[in-house]
Amino acid sequence: EIIEINIILKFHETNLEKKRSNFEITYTAIAKVDKNIKEKKEMEKIILGKIPNEVYPELENLFISLITKSGFPDVKIEKKVDFEKLYNEKFN
């Protein structure tokens, strides 16, 4: 009835000549599964799309804070991740 969802964000220095940093954060969400959801496809959409989209803003804030406090104050995430869109592109 309970599921664990792990979302991993990684940052690698893009200047390969001066590669000095590598950050990774794993954010774990615990969700209670609704007993009424019987279809695998519907469950996948919730696990791979809806829940990651809900927790992503907090994960992004934590990740940027980690990188900033590690001495990289100018790092920004330019592209927001839309997990539902990624799910739809891959599975529909």
Image: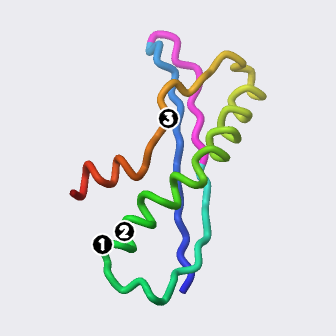
Q: Residues within 10 Å of mark 3 (few under 14, many from 20)?
A: few
Q: Is residue 54 left or right of residue 61?
A: left
Residue pointed to by mark 2: 44
| Residue 23 on the magenta segment | yes
Question: What's under tag 3, amino acid-wise?
Answer: Lys
Residue pointed to by mark 1: 41
The answer to whether mark 2 and mark 1 are in CB contact below 8 A is: yes
Percent of width and height locating residue 6: 53, 59
Q: Residue furthest right?
A: 69
Q: Is residue 45 left or right of residue 19?
A: left
Percent of width and height locating residue 26: 59, 51
Percent of width and height locating residue 22: 56, 31
Question: What's under tag 1, amino acid-wise?
Answer: Lys
Q: In whole angstroms, how far apart are the C-alphas of marks 3 and 1? A: 24 Å
Q: Residue furthest bottom?
A: 35
Question: What's under tag 2, amino acid-wise?
Answer: Glu
Determine the residue positioned at 58% across, 20% down: 20
Q: Is residue 10 left or right of residue 82?
A: right
Determine the residue positioned at 50% across, 27% down: 12
Could you say whether the residue bearing mark 2 is in a helix, strand or loop? Answer: helix
Q: Earlier in the sequence, mark 3 or mark 1?
A: 1
Q: In whole angstroms, how far apart are the C-alphas of marks 2 and 1? A: 5 Å
Determine the residue positioned at 52% across, 65% down: 5
Percent of width and height locating residue 80: 50, 35
* Residues in magenta, as a range: 17-25
Could you say whether the residue bearing mark 1 is in a helix, strand or loop? Answer: helix
Residue pointed to by mark 3: 80
